[in-house]
Image (spheres, grey):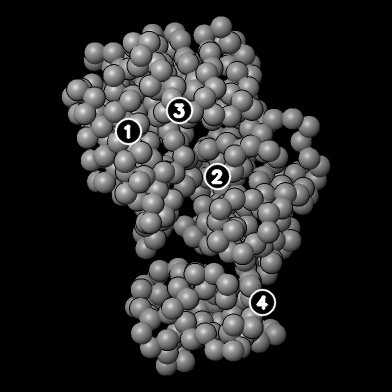
Amino acid sequence: MSYDQSPRLPVVRLSPKAEVRAIRHGFPWVYANELVTDRRTRALTPGTVAVLEDADRKPLGVAGVNPTSKIICRMLDRDPSATIDQDWFALRLSRALAHRVRLYPDPFYRLVHAEADGLPGVIIDRFGDLAVVQPNAAWADRLVSQLVAALVGVTDVKTVIVNGTGRARGLEGLPETMEVAHGTAPTGPIPVPMNGATYLADVMGGQKTGLFYDQRPNHAFAAGLAKDAKVLDVFSHVGGFGLAALANGATEVLAVDGSADALALAEQGAASMGQGAHFTTRKGDAFDVLAALGVETAKYDLVICDPPAFAPARQALDAGLRAYERIARLAAPLVAEGGYLCLCSCSHAADLTKFRNACSRGIGRAGRRGQIIHTGFAGPDHPLMPHLAESGYLKVLFYRL
C-alpha cells in the first residue's frame, strides 16, 4: 500500500561500502558504520523517521533513525512514500492480530514480535483486555501515542501499559519509564490461562511484560512428560514449567528462583488451581541450589532449567556457554534413571549447535549419558524473521538420561 508523504521527510544515505543487497532482500537494520553520518544526519533527533537511500540516491524505503545507536536505522516500510501514522500502525497491528486469533481461542499471547511483525523494536503482549507495550526503539518511543491509539482501535483492549524498561532501551539511549497510557492500572496480578494451568502476571512490576509466552509449546511438551512425576523447575519465574506440569498430573513440583515475588506469584497460581499442597518453592541462586540438591542426593523424574540469557551479546558468548555447561553438569545428577532433563537458552548469540554442545558436555562431565528426544523453539506468536537471526533466540533441548 502506498501513502502520500507530507511533509517531506529528511533523507539519510548508505555509504558506498554498505551491504545494500541485504537491505534490498529484507534485512531490517543499518549499522552506524554503513551510513553517511554527515552533520545533518548526526543532528537528527533520535527516533526521526527518514527516507533511506542507497549510495546512488535511489530510495530504499522509510526508516526510523537513531544517530546515538549502533543500529542507526530500522527499516519501517519499503515504500519510500509511506506515512508512518496511526493508520499505518493499525494496518500492521491488524495483520499481527489476524495471525494470533487463528492460533489461540483466548486473547493471551504475544501480539507483536518486533521486526518479525513489521514493527522494529516493538513488543506487545496481550493479557485479555489489557496489553503491555514495550517501545524498545527510538522511533517507536517517539510515536508511541499513535501506536497506542491504533492498538486500542484494532483490539478494543481497555488498558494499555507502556513498559519502557530493560536493556534494549538503554542501548537506544532511551530513559526508563512505566505508565498507563490508556485505561486504568490493574489492581493486582492478571490471571492467564495456558496449557491447563493458571499463571499470575505482574504487568506493572514483573520481569519484561510480566509473563513469558514464548515457552508455551515447550511448557506443553514438558507437561506431557510430567504425569505421576516428581518435577524440579529451576529459574521458574512465576512457575512456567512447574504449573503446566502440575496441571498435567505431576505429583510434586519444586520451583527454584532468585525472586521471592516471582515465587509468591507461582504459589498463588498453584493455589488457584487447587494444587498448592503439591507445589513448594526454594528461593536462592540457582547454581547454589542445584549444588545443594546434589549434596542432598535429591532425584526427580523431570528437571527443567530455564535461565536468563547467559550470552546476551557475542562478547559474552564464551562465558555464557560455560554457564550453560555448568547448569547441565549440576542438573544432570538430579535426574532419576530414565528421567528427563530440559535445558533452555534465550541467548541469540549462542546458536543451537553451540548450545547443544555445551549442554551435552555438561551432562557427560556429570557422568550421565543422554538421548535428545525433542528440540523446541519459541511459539508461533513469536515468529522468526528469516533475515534476522536475533529473532530466533529461544532454544530448548529435552534429554532422556
Provide the residue designation for mark 4. 45
Q: Which residue is mark 1?
A: 326
**Mark pair 1, 4: CA separation:** 45 Å
3D distance between C-alphas at marks 2 and 4: 30 Å
Rendered-image quadrant of the C terminus? top left
Q: Are marks 2 and 4 in contact (CB under 8 Å)?
A: no
- How many numbered dots are placed on residues in this image? 4
Does residue 339 appear left or right of residue 78 in this picture? left
Res 303 → quadrant: top left
On screen, residue 296 versus residue 277, left or right, reads left
Residue 339: x and y in percent read 28, 16
Looking at the image, which residue is at 49% across and 69% down?
71
Q: Amino acid at mark 2?
A: Arg
User: Residue reaching furthest bottom?
Assistant: 56
* Viewer-nearest residue: 50 or 68: 68
Residue type at the position of mark 1: Arg
Which amino acid type is shown beneath numbered disc 3?
A: Ala
The residue tagged 3 is: 286
Mark 4: few, some, or many residues within 10 Å (few <14, many ≥20)?
some
List x then y, in percent, for residue 294. 35, 16
Work out how far the residue at label 3 is from the one at label 4, CA to CA, in angstroms: 43 Å
| Secondary structure beneath label 1 | helix
Asked if residue 111 shows in the view, the reply is yes
Residue in the image at 26% along x and 46% along y:
354
